[in-house]
Image (spheres, rainbow, N blue to C red):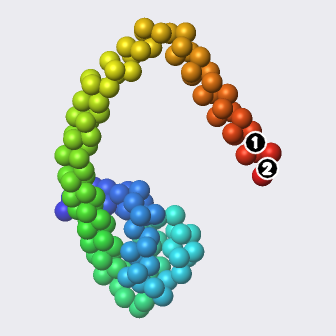
Amino acid sequence: MDQHTPTLSAERFRERFEALLPTIQQEWPQVARETLEATRGSFDEVASLIAEHTGRTVSGVRGQLLDLLHGASDQTRQLADRLGPLEEQLENLLDDLNTSLRPRLEKPVRERPLLAVSVAAAVGVVVGLLLSSGRRSA
């Protein structure tokens, strides 16, 4: 481990502190959430605080916190790997919809622009009336 690794881990811990807080609370329930939040995600302060409340060594707590941090990072990476193909499928589906649906919607608007504008205006008036009557009754 080089000299920059602890600093990088401490920075990553601070960035992910809010997400890690429930897991930290589950692991060390004797430490109050408000007390943990008061550290504002400082790795060293959290480790010292937990050690103080649990009677464990600061270095032991640091090791556990790093394990939690790395475990959370692995889970995030796995989730991103699973979401990648879904995102690609969604993009393909939207492209297909755009290709097939857009011409079917544009054709009537181009053939009868006055009718299209009238229908849009009528829908806008109806929605406006519905929204304004909802506000009055509230």
Residue annotated with mark 1: 133
Q: Residue furthest right?
A: 136
Q: Residue furthest bottom?
A: 55
Residue 11 in the image: state x and y as whole percent: 38, 56
Element on which disc 1 rests = helix
User: Label 2 is placed on what type of residue?
Assistant: Ser
Which residue is painted at 26% across and 72% down in the image?
A: 67
For disc 1, the neighbor class at 10 Å (few under 14, some 14 to 19, many from 20) is few
Which residue is painted at 47% across and 79% down in the image?
A: 49
For disc 2, the neighbor class at 10 Å (few under 14, some 14 to 19, many from 20) is few
Vertical placement of residue 109 versus 92, above or below = above
User: Label 1 is placed on what type of residue?
Assistant: Ser
When asked about the image quadrant of residue 125, the answer is top right
Residue in front for this viewpoint, 3 or 97? 97
Residue in front for this viewpoint, 84 or 137? 137
Residue 97 in the image: state x and y as whole percent: 29, 30
Which residue is painted at 45% across and 14% down in the image?
A: 109
Q: Which mark is residue 137?
A: 2
When asked about the image quadrant of residue 111, the answer is top left
Circles 1 and 2 in contact, beta carbons < 8 Å: yes
Residue 130 in the image: state x and y as whole percent: 69, 39
Vertical placement of residue 95 versus 6, above or below = above
Vertical placement of residue 125 versus 15, above or below = above
Residue 123 in the image: state x and y as whole percent: 60, 28
The reply, left or right, for residue 97 in relation to residue 55 is left
Quadrant of the frame with the N terminus: bottom left
Vertical placement of residue 110 versus 73, above or below = above
